[in-house]
Image (cartoon, helix red, strand yellow):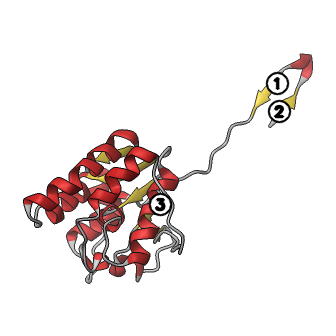
């Protein structure tokens, strides 16, 4: 918005209320969920965010690898080319926990340490997840991506690799944490 002032000066008021958007392993691996509603919601989240920055803890990145490594070599080889390319074309900030995150962590009896740190990491942003336990806390900054019936598509080359990655399917994505 322009504001004319004395002498013809103009101030450009730039204000952004955009909060950092965090994801956990349920969203990333959700693109390969055996539940089609969740798979489409997670894929659409990434398609819609492909030109944006999202944040993910290194521990959640490791959780994704841990899941993939449980599959046979052939399935891993079908999956990883897509994941590698997505991390190349999309600004996914993989960030470690810091002292502030650890100090923000609150103990909740029904949450694992992993879940407590995931919540603390995203405390000043929005956490997208399909983790049922985290969603049941009803925190206003923890939500799942919207469910869609219609699937969106990645740019042409990336979509080809995504389709190949669907050889890997994850059951019960909402309880992997």
Q: Where, by quadrant of the figure, is residue 59 drawn?
A: bottom left
Instruction: Verify CB contact (< 8 Å) between mark 2 and mark 1.
Output: yes
Q: Secondary structure at mark 3?
A: helix
Q: Residue at x 38, y 47 (%)?
A: 158
> Residue 154 bears which disc, if any?
none
Q: Quadrant of the N terminus?
A: top right
Pointer 1: what residue?
A: 10
Q: CA distance from mark 2 to mark 1?
A: 6 Å
Toward the viewer: 174 or 31?
Answer: 31
Toward the viewer: 102 or 56?
Answer: 56
Question: Percent from the top left, x then y, of residue 32?
Answer: 31, 67
Is residue 126 at least partly visible in the picture? no
Bin the neighbour count of mark 2 within 10 Å (Cα to Cα): few under 14, some 14-19, many 20 and up: few
Q: Secondary structure at mark 2?
A: strand
Question: Percent from the top left, x then y, of residue 160?
Answer: 36, 51
> Residue 2 bears which disc, if any?
2
Question: Percent from the top left, x then y, of residue 36?
Answer: 39, 76
Q: Is residue 151 above or below residue 134?
A: above
Pointer 3: what residue?
A: 45
Q: Residue at x 49, y 52 (%)?
A: 49
Q: Is residue 59 above or below residue 15?
A: below
Q: Earlier in the sequence, mark 1 or mark 3?
A: 1
Identify the residue at the far top of this view. 7
Bin the neighbour count of mark 3 within 10 Å (Cα to Cα): few under 14, some 14-19, many 20 and up: many
Bin the neighbour count of mark 1 within 10 Å (Cα to Cα): few under 14, some 14-19, many 20 and up: few
């Amino acid at each position: 918005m322009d504001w004319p002032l004395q002498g013809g000066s103009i101030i450009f008021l730039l204000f952004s209320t955009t909060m950092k958007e965090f994801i956990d392993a349920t969203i990333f691996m959700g693109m390969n969920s055996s539940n089609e509603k969740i798979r489409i919601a997670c894929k659409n989240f990434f398609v819609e965010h492909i030109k944006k920055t999202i944040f993910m803890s290194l521990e959640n990145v490791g959780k994704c690898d841990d899941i993939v490594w449980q599959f046979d070599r052939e399935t891993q080889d079908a999956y990883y080319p897509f994941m590698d390319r997505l991390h190349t074309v999309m600004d996914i900030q993989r960030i470690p926990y810091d002292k502030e995150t650890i100090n923000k962590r609150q103990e909740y009896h029904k949450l694992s340490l992993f879940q407590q740190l995931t919540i603390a990491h995203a405390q000043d942003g929005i956490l997208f997840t399909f983790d049922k336990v985290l969603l049941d806390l009803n925190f206003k900054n923890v939500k799942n991506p919207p469910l869609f019936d219609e699937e969106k598509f990645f740019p042409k080359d990336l979509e080809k690799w995504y389709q190949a990655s669907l050889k890997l399917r994850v059951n019960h994505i909402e309880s992997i944490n």
